[in-house]
Image: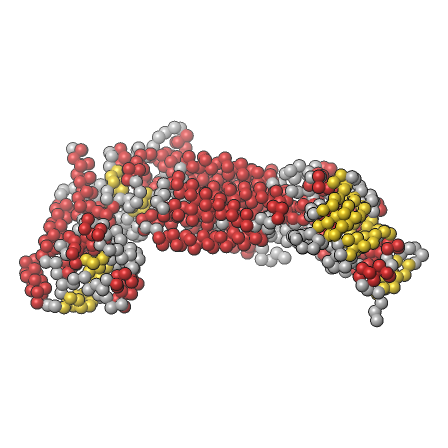
Amino acid sequence: MRLEARNLKFSYGAETPIINGVDMLLEPGSMAALLGPNGSGKSTLLRLLCGLLTPSNGEILIDGRNLATINARERALCIASVFPGIYRQAAYTVRELAMMGRAAHMPFWGASSKDDEKQVDFALEATGMRPLEKRLISELSSGEMQRAQIAMALAQDAPIIMLDEPTAFLDLKHQMEILTLLRDLNREHGRSILCVSHDLNLLSKFFKLLFIMKSGKIHTQGRVCDVLTTQTMLDVFGVEVAIEKDNAGLVRIDVMVK
Amino acid sequence: MSGRAIFNKPLTRIIPALLVMLGLAFILSLAVGSSSAGLSDLLALSGGASSTAGGIILELRLPRALMALFAGIALASGGCVYQALLRNPLAEPYILGVSGGAAVGAIFGALVGLHSRPATVAMSFVFAMLAMIFVMRVARRRNYFLDSNILILAGVVLNTLFSALIVLFLSLIRDPQSQTVFFWLMGDLSSVTLAEAMAVAFPVLSVSAVLCLYGFRLNLIHLGEDAAKQAGITVEKDKWILFALASLAAALTVSFTGIIGFVGLLVPHAARRLFGADNRRLIPTAALCGGAFLLFCDTLARVVASPVELPTGVITAAFGVPFFLILLWRERNAP
Amino acid sequence: MPLFLLVWLFASAVYAQERTVVDELGYSFTVKAFPKRVVSLAPEITEMIFAGGCGNRLVAASEYSDFPEAARKLPQVGSYARPDIEKIASYAPDLVIGSASGNPERSIARLRELGLNVYVIFPRDVKGALDSFRSVSELLGCGEHGFRLANALDARFESCKALPVEKSPEAIILFNLDPPISSGADTLSDDLLSWAGLSNILHDSSIRYPTISLEWIVSEDPEFIFLAIQSGDNNASAAFFDRFPNMQAVRKKQVIVVDPDLVSRAGPRLVQGAIVLREALVKARGKMP
């Protein structure tokens, strides 16, 4: 499923637009990350792309269809997203959480079918949450919670999964877990992944495509090895870095501390 | 709102048990009162006998029992919805100014000389609905987005204003009239007629049925509005419908029964601990528990100080609070 | 004995300019012999004063002082439950007369703090009401008219009781219908019922004005139901019990609307109240052999 944004603009009120003319293209099966300094509009762009916000200008197309014309249920079948801000004290089990991801597949009153159960089983296994499925979400660690939310998005069975800083506040081990999971979802299960993140080093090892934002626009986009240059880092982040590429094409970024 | 359910059985086994309990509470309500009319008289009624005792049961106890049933259902199911939508354990259907509005309406009506029962009920309902509409309008943001925090704030502030108005009106009211109104303020099922109970039946039962159907969506919205929206739920529309329906049912019953507190607040909590937080299970079970609870409290109100009759609202508080404290106490060692 | 009392009173009334009085709660103070500016804090007190012939001494009265007709012209100084202290003080009365069964203690205390003379009556039953009537008349120096009237009323009460009555039929007085509010022990209306030869079914209630359940009234099935509703439509009240046609009072048409002021005000009209109640009983008995 192809996601395209054309001349997207958005502002919360009469103030300066947060998103000021974004054009981007996400091909099916992409493994993409969205970077940028704080305040560049990354989260807002993500919310626009998955339909949580309505753009003031421009359009978002899914396989050529305007997102604004698609109803909530259909949209859920195209794009699943994972945002922070889940009410952790809600007394639901991991399995119940994952099942909620099936909302677009179930009737109004939420009765689950065998197919729904199978999809949830699959989602829980893929995220390694099957052993924890009866645990309450309030009893999960941050890493487990993140995986549970990804299970929910996976159960939703949408070709595109968007995540807003899924590795924030996680320790290295858990960050690795999540990023590995996302990579597997992309490689083995064919989902398009679009991920907002800050972690430049890890990103460059897991993602193939980068969108770098600055001041409400896409400053640069393209393959990781092409886009991650010292000049880009200086332009966008105002920080001097040293970039090392190894034979495998993996990029390492070193910050220059004076 | 964390913790496991005490009764984890499937709904198909819980609902019949609750229905039986409800039926027993209803029969108890009909068979017990401050007079000696009892079970035998109740049974004699079905044989078509006409007697004083039969008259007592049909004319006086039956309308009350029905209204207690419907009010309990409305308040408890509404309470579940409010607590889920607002993510606030103290939320209940009166919170948006419905109770204060109803009280102000009734007292204001008495003040300007409207003493008849239909007038009081109508004034109550109108003021309750106006309060709700006002609060929802205040909390409405751009694109019809309903801000839950503003909703609570506006509702609480409005209720505070209403409390002041109630005190003011009560001080202005002529002594003889204040009796009826004062009793009503604390929850009074004694003035209910059979016609009123039947009038309330369909709206309350249909609203509660709809709320039950929304159980799954309510789970999602409760979990997170973004998460729900991205999963395909029309969150804003659902919120409007849910708030409006729950408040409507509450406003309707409060107009006839006065302010019966604690049912909307405590029954959902108790039901959640007993049957779990999944709203698909919670709303129907809480509704049935609410009906039974209010029936039981009303029976007590009529009997405990016989022949003096206490306002039902006093009993729901006196009874509900310790019951709930016991439930909380049981959990003291839980993580 | 009464004659001697009268003579003594006249003497003291004429010769004393000020005297010490003790009110019914035991509070003593000095007051002018013939107080010219009097304020009444309760409708029954207003009635007593007018009945005693001293109505012209009143400068102001509480709300609902609506009997006799002349009393309505008096300026109002707040209600029974909330006398308007400022207003009362502004009339600079020689004497204020209040009732302990209605006026709050604090208001009485406040008035006394302001230096006003307040005489408090506390009539607990019919005889007590008559005694208060006498006290008030004497206090104001109304002359013998008040006393004569009180004695006449007393006599009529006694004659009420003297009429032969076998077992007192059961009755109830309702002051409100929705919810039903009646009177229990130690109330004026309870006493009135027994004077009229009737037995209050709530006679043993420790709560003086309990809110009771309709169901209980229906099951107790008193012979007489007196509706002394203070607000609302009396015609509607009368039909209130029609849905229980098996009740004695309904069958025998003994659901009777009475003027609430006659049975709840501790004033001279209590006699009328007793007569109304008594007449109902007599009429009922008259129908039967």
- Report the front residue among A108 and C250: A108
| Residue located 70% across and 37% down the image | A113
| Residue located 41% across and 35% down the image | B194
- Report the front residue among C36 and B232: C36
Please say whether residue B218 is visible from this viewpoint: no
Q: Which quadrant is home to the C terminus of chain C?
A: top left
Please say whether residue A62 is visible from this viewpoint: yes
Horizontally, residue B300 falls left or right of residue A205, namely left
* x and y, in percent, of residue B303 in the image: 39, 45
Residue A166 location, quadrant: bottom right
Q: How many numbered callouts?
A: 0
Vertical order, C63 against C165 (above or below): below
Residue sticking out furthest to the bottom: A258
Residue sticking out furthest to the right: A247
- Report the front residue among B193 and B266: B193
Residue A214 location, quadrant: bottom right
* x and y, in percent, of residue A7 in the image: 76, 47
* x and y, in percent, of residue C54 in the image: 14, 56
Colouring mode (rainbow / by chain / secondary structure / one colour):
secondary structure
Horizontally, residue B263 falls left or right of residue B42, namely right
Residue sticking out furthest to the top: B48
| Residue located 29% across and 65% down the image | C110
* x and y, in percent, of residue B165 in the image: 42, 53
| Residue located 65% across and 46% down the image | B220
Q: Which quadrant is home to the N terminus of chain C?
A: bottom left
